[in-house]
Amino acid sequence: GAFITSWLGKSTDDGNLGHDMAFLAIPVALAVALQLFSLKPKVADKLED
């Protein structure tokens, strides 16, 4: 937590906050994709009873 806060603070000071927030979105997207792949949520199919 402290590392990310420090890194984002330095990024804001340098004017790169938008770029670095987009960079942080990559691991978040990978984590969501991994969870969807591994948990395989069931889709409500209203055609079957």
Image: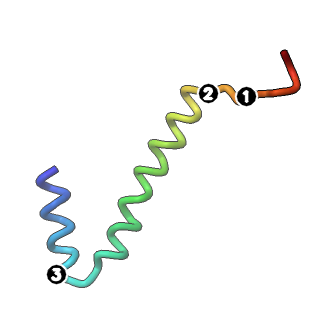
- What residue does disc 3 label? 13
Q: Gap between marks 3 and 1, in whole Å?
A: 47 Å
Q: Amino acid at mark 2?
A: Lys
Q: Provide the secondary structure element on which disc 2 rests.
A: loop
How far is mark 1 from mark 2, CA to CA?
Answer: 13 Å
Q: Quadrant of residue 15?
A: bottom left
Mark 2 or mark 3: whose residue is earlier in sequence: 3
Q: Tell me the residue that label 1 is attached to.
A: 44
Label 1 neighbour load within 10 Å: few <14, some 14-19, many 20+? few
Q: Position of residue 37 (x, y in %)?
A: 58, 33
Outermost bottom residue: 15
Q: Residues within 10 Å of mark 2 (few under 14, many from 20)?
A: few
Q: Is residue 34 left or right of residue 8?
A: right
Q: Amino acid at mark 3?
A: Asp
Q: Secondary structure at mark 1?
A: loop
According to the picture, the residue beneath numbered tag 2 turns out to be: 40
Q: CA distance from mark 2 to mark 3?
A: 41 Å
